[in-house]
Amino acid sequence: MGRLPIVSLNAALALAIAGLVACDTVASKDAPMATNERSQAVEQKGTPAATTPATIPVAASQPAVPKKPRSLCGGKLEEAGRAFPKKHLSRAAGKNAPALPETLPVASGKWTWVNFWAAWCAPCKEEIPRLLGFEKKLAGAPFRLSFVSLDDDERQLSDFLDGQPDTGLHASYWLKEGSEREDWLKAAGQSPDAPLPFHILVDPKGKIRCSISGAIEDADYAEISTIVAGH
């Protein structure tokens, strides 16, 4: 076997050196790209605005519309009115309560507010203290308050009146179920099947001037006091 020619060794070394240089060149070209990608990744991670969806604008809330005060009689005070019924009404009273007059008092120069209620009617019972409070505020004014029960069950009515506090309702007129109730309410221009509570306002001359459906609210006092003072 003979030696490899010196020229061949030198050529091999040259090729090897050229290969190392080429690899280093490729590595040096790839390194900035890797560094740039990491930098971009850190930058994107640190700037959430670039990845957060656009914020959806929230519509401005509409201003609340103030509730328009209701009118209890709505111009009916200018009408002639209807005569208050003179038909018989029964009466009911709790223990030790003073007896009511045989006839529901109206006229005599006073406005009379008549509340129709029942012991089984939740909004009726809720508004009774309110009406009694109105009567107390109008003490000295030409105003009186009367209650007429439309209860069917006498025991339920009596138990309610017995259980009232000292400042509560202890006696009430009572329209018993049947012809007594139907005839009286028809004479007053009211439906015997009207939902409770409802009310009628009688002027100082004994004329029914308006009827009001539903429970009375605190805000209604202003109109009631104005009617009493101004008519």
Image: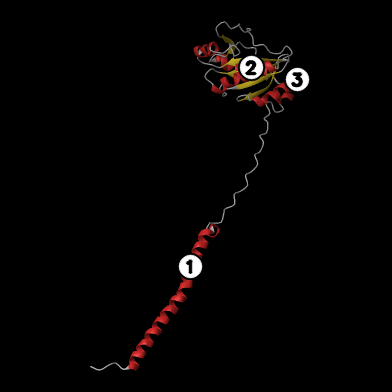
Which quarter of the figure is the C terminus placed in? top right
Q: Mark 2 is on which residue type?
A: Leu
Q: Residue at x 39, y 83 (%)?
A: 19
Q: Which residue is mark 1?
A: 37
- Horizontally, residue 100 falls left or right of residue 140, namely left
Query: 10 Å neighbourhood of mark 3: few (<14), some, or many (≥20)?
Result: few
Q: Nearer the viewer, residue 142 or 190?
A: 142
Of badges 1 and 2, nearer the viewer stands 1
**Cα distance between the residues tagged 3 and 2:** 18 Å
Mark whose residue sits in front, 3 or 1: 1
The x, y position of residue 85, in whole percent, is 65, 14
Q: Could you say whether the residue bearing mark 3 is in a helix, strand or loop? A: helix
Model colouring: secondary structure
Q: Position of residue 119 (x, y in %)?
A: 53, 17
Marks 3 and 2: which is nearer the front? 2
Circle nearer the N terminus (3, 1): 1
Query: Label 2 crowding class (10 Å Cα cut-off): few <14, some 14-19, many 20+?
Result: some
Which residue position is annotated with label 2? 132
Which mark identifies residue 229?
A: 3
Q: Dot 1, how many residues are within 10 Å of its Cα: few (below 14), some (14-19), or many (20+)?
A: few
Mark 3 vs mark 1, CA separation in Å: 87 Å
Q: Residue at x 33, y 92 (%)?
A: 8
Marks 1 and 2, how far apart at CA: 83 Å
Q: Earlier in the sequence, mark 1 or mark 2?
A: 1
Q: Quadrant of residue 111?
A: top right
